[in-house]
Image (cartoon, helix red, strand yellow):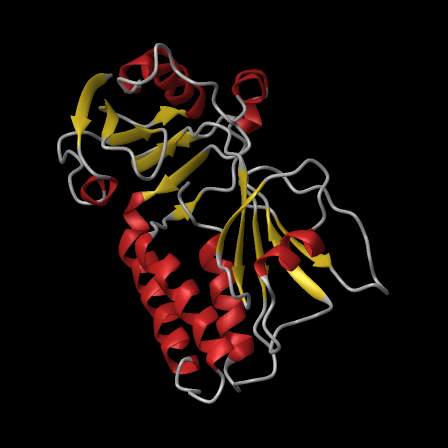
Amino acid sequence: MTLFIRFLPLLLIFLTWSVNAETTITVTQSASATKTLTLEYQKPVRLVQVVEDSLANISKLVSQNDIQPQPIYWLSAGLYDLSTATAVENQQQQVLHLLNIQDSNKNKPQNIQAIKALSDWITVNKFAKREAIVLDFDSVRLKEELNPLISEHYLFSLPTKPGYVMVLGAVEKNGKQPFRVRQNATKYLDWALPIDDSNNSFAWLIQPDGKVEHYPIAYWNNHQIDIAPGAIIYLEFQGAQENEQVLNQQVIELLKYWIR
């Protein structure tokens, strides 16, 4: 295994992996980090080895403001396939195109505000195909079926625990809401101010591990689902444009790939 420390924005990581290594793993603690750790292997490597090497060297990613590494929030940890970067970028652009079509309805300023805020958020964030695998170190170490061979080029994100829930979609205030223990989706949405042309029966909950759940939010179907720190609540657009169903589906699919 070869180890590199790189001081690069995440955007450049998608373009700068080594052509000499069979497997390259870029380790970071956030999508906005300027310091990354690069692990290079000359052959495919087991997932447990990637996790072990990342943990052994994560102190090298500590910022000047921290004395020691902050605890990893494993629920948000993600392994992202960088070889699919072009396909996911195209998916991101398609969502932005659909939002731009929605924005053509100039008679509803409330809708325009929500669409612009969501579009701006998608534009400035990074996305990549997230592997649907368990990353908990003890589980990977003890169960062979959870320890696959890894090859080619990946981003391994090991974020710290956030203090927010992200609320997006058909709301006036797209963005972060402070996390509150056992707070339901309805309350988070109330604070974000749903627009008139929104789904008032269900929202979508995307947990930090990428799990997607249909969340009931009406008085007649109220059901508590625990929302973890760093989760996304997406409220669908409904009732203004014909392409809303396609838009909502593509946004939800893209949000699963959000790099935290």
Question: Which image quadrant is residue 192 in?
Answer: bottom right
Question: Which image quadrant is residue 39 in?
Answer: top left
Does 213 appear above or below 52?
A: below
Does 131 appear above or below 204?
A: above
Q: Nearer the viewer, residue 80 or 74?
A: 74
Q: How many marks?
A: 0
Q: Position of residue 11 (x, y in %)?
A: 22, 45
Residue at figure coordinates x 56%, y 73% from the top left: 237
Does 250 appear above or below 11?
A: below
Q: Position of residue 146 (x, y in %)?
A: 55, 28
Q: On the rendered structure, is 222 left or right of 5?
A: right
Q: On the rendered structure, is 221 left or right of 205?
A: right
Q: Position of residue 159 (x, y in %)?
A: 43, 30
Residue at figure coordinates x 35%, y 75% from the top left: 97
Quadrant including the N terminus: top left
Q: Nearer the viewer, residue 252 or 104?
A: 104
Q: Residue at the right extreme?
A: 220
Quadrant including the C terminus: top left
Residue at figure coordinates x 19%, y 21% from the top left: 5
Question: Which image quadrant is residue 142 in?
Answer: top right
